[in-house]
Amino acid sequence: MDLRTTYLGLKLAHPIIASASPLTSTVEGIRALEAAGAAAVVMPSLFEEQIRAEDTAYAMYTEHGSYSHPEAGSYFPELADYDRGVSGHLNTVRRAVDAVGIPVITSLNAVTPEGWTDYATRLEGAGAAALELNMYFVATDTSASSQDVEARYVDVVRSVKRVVKIPVAVKLSPFFSSTGNFAHKLADAGADGIVLFNRFYQPDFDLATLSVKANLKLSTSHEAGPPLLWIALLAGRIRCSLAATSGVETSDQVIKYLLAGADTVMTASALLRHGPGYMRTLVSGLMVWLEQSGPASVAVVRGLRSMKRLDNAAELLRAQYMNLITEYVPGHLAA
């Protein structure tokens, strides 16, 4: 049984990766995931805004009131290892890389051109095997066109690729008007991989206080549809790796993503629900299915149901939608 795959040029024992979550934020958590059989891990994003906030707090607590008294120029000595609030995250990356034998992929979410390039080089220097650009950006400016938004992403990819040598993946949201065309633009700009799709954590309202509140919900298998569709449409037709994320609750979703053409499948919610050891369940489920269905390897299965391999591509598109609507019987819709 050959479960091996390649993602961003990295050789992996199998296609299931632990994506960014609290479980991948510590060295202990990453060790536990490796012990449970994770092929690789993606660490939580380094956020530029968080670093700025920490820098502001550091300056406030160490400099407030300094040089206000003739006998004291300042109150605290400079910390020799303080590196603009990023040192702690980089230290965790270094320790994780040294502690495990699987690839440690780092994630970056910046807001300025300097932030993207500066922190990308720092993460590379800390030993990251690859870098995932987590572009969590909502275009709230109504004067910005879709071309403006896409150009912003493309510019970031080009800038980061100019300063790092490690592979770079881009994690996209599902809200682009022409996802396929945009994915090709990112690949042309140098992206080594596309991760489909990011989940925007949408706000909610507290009716008692009328305030905005966070409403974090773990993903379910029902969310696998959009990434499944777009991976099936892109597989074999784009010059970069494809990673699937969202809706991976059981090995069934892993298998479906592979059939669509994904090189790797990422999961976080299932591991948060069931613990790091659930990785074994996902991997063993994949192995059992391969043994029962006949294919000897992941490579044979990958892309069998992609648009490039289907005799009738309409199965993926509008014809299937029309069939669902016209054949629906109230009260008998499959779960």
Image (spheres, helix red, strand yellow):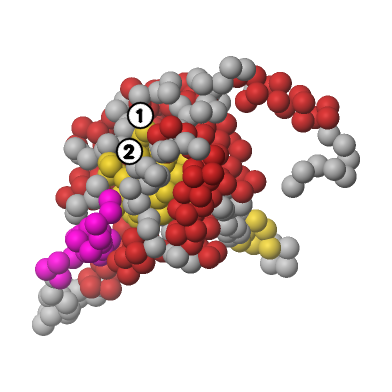
Residue 75 position, x and y percent, is: 17, 78
- Is 307 positioned to the left or the right of 135 in the image? right
Residue drawn at the location 31% of the way across and 58% of the way down? 51
Q: Is residue 144 above or below residue 296?
A: above
**Residue 94's disc number:** none
What residue sits right under mark 2 in the picture? 6
On the rendered image, what quadrant is the N terminus found in? top left
Label 2, residues with CA under 10 Å away: few <14, some 14-19, many ≥20: some
Task: Tell me the kind of residue under disc 1.
Answer: Cys
Spatial CA span between label 2 and label 1: 11 Å
For the record, the magenta segment spans: 79-103
Residue 262 lies in quadrant: top left
Determine if the magenta segment contains residue 83.
yes
Task: Tell me the kind of residue under disc 2.
Answer: Thr
Mark 2 or 1: the one toward you: 2
Residue 320 position, x and y percent, is: 71, 25
Label 1, residues with CA under 10 Å away: few <14, some 14-19, many ≥20: many
What residue sits right under mark 1 in the picture? 240
Q: Nearer the viewer, residue 155 or 79?
A: 155
Residue drawn at the location 57% of the way across and 46% of the way down? 252
Q: Nearer the viewer, residue 142 or 109?
A: 109
Residue 286 position, x and y percent, is: 49, 48
Asked if marks 2 and 1 touch (Cβ < 8 Å), the reply is no
Residue 37 lies in quadrant: bottom left
Residue 229 position, x and y percent, is: 57, 31
Q: Secondary structure at mark 2?
A: strand
- Is 304 positioned to the left or the right of 322 in the image? left
- Is 107 positioned to the left or the right of 122 in the image? right
Specify whether residue 46 is in view. yes
